[in-house]
Image: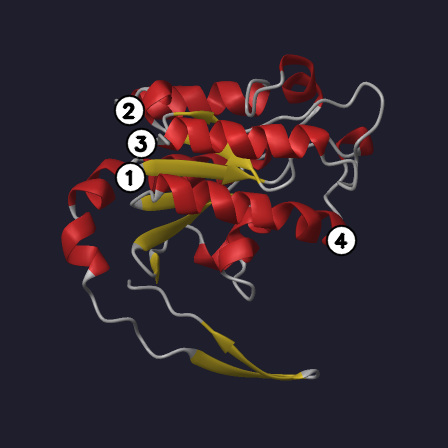
Amino acid sequence: MSKAAELEKIKAEMETNASLPLRAEGINLVFGVGSAEAELVFIGEAPGFHENKHMEPFVGRAGQLLNKLLERVKIPRAQVYITNIVKHRPPGNRDPEPDELSAYKPYLTRELHIIKPKIVATLGRFSMNYFLPYAKISTDHGKIYKMNQTLIYPLYHPAAALRSTTVLGELEKDFLKIPAILKKYDSLITKVERPKEIIETKKGTIEKQQPLF
């Protein structure tokens, strides 16, 4: 079975899974789009109004900004894969709740297992925390992390960049590095990971993964 066919199988499963939260009348499944052979995958948090209407991720204003950034680095949108963790629109575009994130995460895991991208560029804190639970978008964006044979590259969400010129500048700066990271993938993926940072919190000790650089 081809990668594209495997992804379609997951989509079909989600369309018939009545146990998924956020399913409701007028709420469409917004599955990932793009190349099943993509070296670069973008992951957001959840679809919004326009995404629900067109049943495609990142087609509203945030998606238009993403398209412009892809054009700047000369990467066609058709050559990447774009998806969200949560694949139904939360009411009023609110943030996804923990139980909703948990319900949809297994499907995202399967998507990535099929595609096997070189780089996963997370858009915003929710998708970043899927891979890096203790990372903070304000301090960890633009850093490169290693997870098995994939590089995790946290970016600000385009929607946040539309609300702040400062965030937009940071997103543009980080985005422009993507072509170089792709070119250096082989050398980066063989780098030895730095020891995890031990952090003492009120809830106990946690281990925070360190970036390659």
Q: Which residue is mark 3?
A: 37
* Badge 2 amino acid: Ile
Task: Say whether disc 3 or disc 4 marks the residue closer to the N-terminus.
Answer: 3
In the rendered image, residue 178, in percent from the top left (x then y), is placed at: 29, 39
* Badge 4 amino acid: Asp
* Badge 3 amino acid: Glu
The quadrant in which the C terminus is found is: bottom left
- Residue at x-position 18% and y-position 62%: 190
Q: Mark 1 and 4 residues: CB-CB less than 8 Å, in contact?
A: no
**Dot 3: what SS?**
loop
Instruction: Assess disc 3: are there few (<14), some (14-19) or many (≥20) residues with their C-alpha within 10 Å of its C-alpha.
Output: some
The image quarter containing residue 87 is: top right
Query: Please, which residue is most extreme toward the right here?
Result: 25
**Dot 2: what SS?**
loop
Q: CA distance from mark 1 to mark 4?
A: 32 Å
Q: Which residue is mark 2?
A: 75
Q: Which mark is residue 85?
A: none
- Residue at x-position 75% and y-position 32%: 93
Q: Which residue is mark 1?
A: 178
In the rendered image, residue 47, in percent from the top left (x then y), is placed at: 65, 29
